[in-house]
Amino acid sequence: MIEQLLINLLLGFGIGLSLGLLGGGGSILTVPALVYVVGQTPQAAVTASLMIVGANSMMGAFMHRSQGTLNWRVALIFGGSGMAAAYLAAGWSALLQPTTLMILFALLMLIVGLFMVFRPQPSNEDGHGRGWLVTVASGLGVGILTGFLGVGGGFLIVPALVMLVGLPIRQAIGTSLVVIAMNSLAGFLGHLHDPAIDLQVVTVFVAAGLTGALTGARLARLVHPEYLRKAFALFVIALALVLLADNFHKMGWI
């Protein structure tokens, strides 16, 4: 019992740290942890993950706000348009098999990660971005991909805010956390009628995750922006390769 509690605390801290430092990694880390380590069903894990990631994202967002690395205007415009697009595109995923969807998502992550490694950082460090039309269009694009592929979060939002909207990487991370919290709330409301979740497990993950998000947000302030951008890109590439290998194995290709 105590051993499982310590494991849950460590996992929760790691998830919060990833969100606070990189602006992503929440759902992609939380759902497997709840299923394979805690032993929850996938349905219960998804609902619990939305609560955990949403709470941790808001904590990280407020920390980034206090450091001046959060753009509320971009977050609300990007997040609002993305939520609408994700809702409309959600039904499209039924057209493809789950394994095919995950392969497409992994390929998208791989392309995004490579772009972030080799594409120069936008020069406009004032944090105002490129205007609301570009922000809306970027939010719609990410929302469509999120709804269609069933996943998204910071691994699509941060690169879009950096490469399309033109935010500096630190501000993109802080801003993405607001968008993730908005998406988590919308998703949680859609899962209210799912099987009951284990509130004790959620509480432990949230408590440890809030500490991790606080630590991650502080670390993000200390790390050089270029190193932060490259670290995020390499994290995305590594996860993409893991997903590709796993799903190629499921299809019998390797």
Image (cartoon, rainbow, N blue to C red):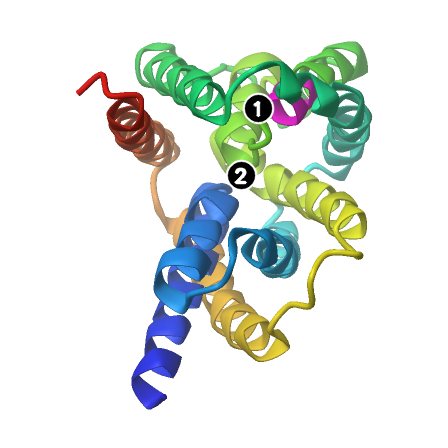
Location of the C terminus by quadrant is top left
Q: Which residues are magenta?
A: 143-149
Placement of the N terminus among the 4 image quadrants: bottom left
Question: In which quarter of the view is residue 53 placed?
Answer: bottom right
**What is the x, y in percent for residue 95?**
62, 14
Residue 93 counted in the magenta span: no
State how far apart marks 2 and 1 are (Cα): 22 Å
- Of the residues shown, which amino acid type is indicated by label 2? Ile
Q: Label 1 near label 2: C-beta < 8 Å?
A: no
Mark toward the viewer: 2 or 1: 1
Instruction: State the image coordinates of residue 31 (x, y, percent, origin top left).
Output: 48, 51
Q: Is residue 48 left or right of residue 128?
A: left
**Which residue was labeled with disc 2?**
173
Q: Nearer the viewer, residue 116 or 41?
A: 41
Q: Which residue is at a point 63% across and 51% down the rendered structure image?
A: 61
Q: Is residue 64 shown above or below 79? A: below
Reading the image, the residue beneath label 1 is 149
Q: Along the polypeptide, which appears first: circle 2 or circle 1? A: 1
